[in-house]
Amino acid sequence: MNDMRVCDRDREAVVVRLGAAAGEGRLTLVEFEDRSGQAYVAKTYGELDALVADLPSVAHDHKAMVLDHRRMVLSLLALAGGVVWMPLFPYLDFGALPGAAGVVFGLLGLRANAHLLCRVLALLGLVGGSVGVALQVVWIIFQLVEG
């Protein structure tokens, strides 16, 4: 099969796979551009297979996606911690605790996930938590100065 000729759809499938690998950090931008160019001029399956030989198989990529969905919990916890302090701030003596949880889970969520949605949720939790902690510090300083 290595000597069989490929069609445009086969070439495009390899370029999509290379793009996904570049997005995951498996290929540099230069490697992606080089391999994509080679894919578009490839004539046989053997030439296309050589371009992705050092990349994980599609089955391996699917397992990684499932793992990312499990790790989405970190991103959701970051978002909850980063946002929950807002309505509770006036009622908590130490309102920075949910904010600190948002920061910690946000950092863990950013580190654990490659999926864009998970990273965005973790980043929102991180930013919201940081604001919550900063406001708590300002509140404490204000109380010390006033009292």
Image: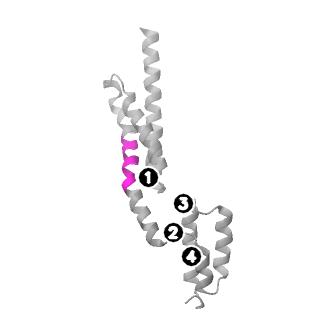
The quadrant in which the N terminus is found is: bottom right
Find the residue positioned furthest to the front.
Answer: 54
- How far separated are the C-alphas under marks 2 and 1? 22 Å
Q: Earlier in the sequence, mark 4 or mark 3?
A: 4
Sequence-first disc among 4 and 1: 4
> In the rendered view of the protein, which quadrant contains the C terminus?
top left
Q: Position of residue 69 (x, y in %)?
A: 38, 57
Most extreme residue toward the left is 91
Q: Earlier in the sequence, mark 4 or mark 2?
A: 4
Q: Nearer the viewer, residue 85 or 11?
A: 11
Q: Badge 4: how crowded within 10 Å, few (<14), some, or many (20+)?
A: some
Q: Residue at x 39, y 36 (%)?
A: 101
Say which element carries label 1.
Answer: helix
Amino acid type, residue under disc 2 in the picture: Pro
Q: Residue at x 44, y 29 (%)?
A: 133
Magenta region: which residues?
Answer: 70-80
Q: CA distance from mark 4 to mark 3?
A: 15 Å
Q: Which mark is residue 85?
A: none
Label 3: which residue? 24
Q: What is the number of the mark on residue 14?
A: 4
The residue carrying mark 2 is 56
Residues at discs 2 and 1 in contact (Cβ within 8 Å): no
Q: Are marks 4 and 2 in contact (CB under 8 Å)?
A: no
To which residue does mark 1 refer? 118
Labels 3 and 2: the sequence-earlier one: 3
| Residue occupying the point 57% across, 77% down | 12
